[in-house]
Amino acid sequence: MTDLADPFAQAATTAATLRKLADVPDFDVAVVLGSGWQSAADAIGTPRHEITLSDISGWPVPAVPGHVPSARYVMVGRRRVLVFLGRVHLYEGHQPGAVVHAVRAAVAAGCGTVILTNAAGGISPDYRAGQPVLVSDHINLTGRSPLAGPPPPAGYPSQFTDLSDLYSTRLRALAREVDPALAEGVYAALPGPHYETPAEIRMLRTAGADLVGMSTALEAIAARHLGADVLAISLVTNPAAGLTTAQLDHGEVIRAAEASATQIGHLLASLFSRL
Ligand code: 8IG
């Protein structure tokens, strides 16, 4: 599958469409909801507009159960929040440009804060299923970058982006003000779609990873490249391979996420008022 031909121009075009469909001059915050996080959408607030993303030309369409190709415009306090009820992944055959399109469009539409959520396997033995964990940093093992390819057009930052404070220290501190019990961990991003072997999980643990999943890292890089502040939250839905004798099952993952997503939606809503 080919990548977007002109990703930055396409993001600007999509941004204009999103603003027009929601009838707003700008958005403030983007939220990307991962597998099983859909019930968090309702807890964030009542949508003013529901946007069907497949209506937007060139939009990469998610093809995974638990991912709905729509977005909502929600007003939370004074913040205009753009909530994406799903994402696309490398493992669906999408290229990095398609994977980060929603985030690039959101930043182009004014979002200075990008909140990425995902369901993840727990590598740290301290985590239990259903627990939200702030991502403190990542290890990108996808072998891909949304910034590979020709340099961005004039007016955009260099493709050699600094990632030293990728997951904003300030935003993580704000999240802990809302919920002081929130744990933090390092997220290892793998291409999937298969889960890991126990040997791979032992390697990841030695490398310093606490969480493992198949999303988020490329979107975080693309958002940071455009100057947005990034917060990422993983919902631990299963112990990583080899940490339990149970088999990993996609349906089980989605059910575990749904059970906690409402609670985390409220956490997100209280966070917006502090931004
Ligand atoms: I949910 O154990 C979820 N997503 N790579 N490994 C990887 N992705 C995941 C896992 C997991 N659990």
Image (cartoon, rainbow, N blue to C red):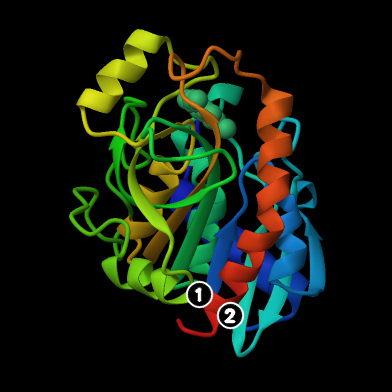
Q: Is residue 151 left or right of residue 108?
A: left
Q: Nearer the viewer, residue 29 or 26?
A: 29
User: In this view of the protein, which residue sits in the foreground, 84 or 209?
Assistant: 209
Contact, mark 1 vs mark 2 (Cβ under 8 Å): yes
Image position, residue 186 (x, y; %): 31, 42
79 sits to left or right of 5: right
The quarter holding residue 207 reads top left
Identify residue type, mark 2.
Answer: Asp
Q: Residue at x 45, y 43 (%)?
A: 216
Tell me residue 58's x, y (percent): 66, 44
Residue that badge 1 annotates? 110
Residue under label 2, please give it.
26
Q: Quadrant of the C terminus?
A: bottom left
Q: Secondary structure at mark 1?
A: loop
Can residue 58 be seen in this snapshot? no
SS class of the residue under badge 2? Answer: loop
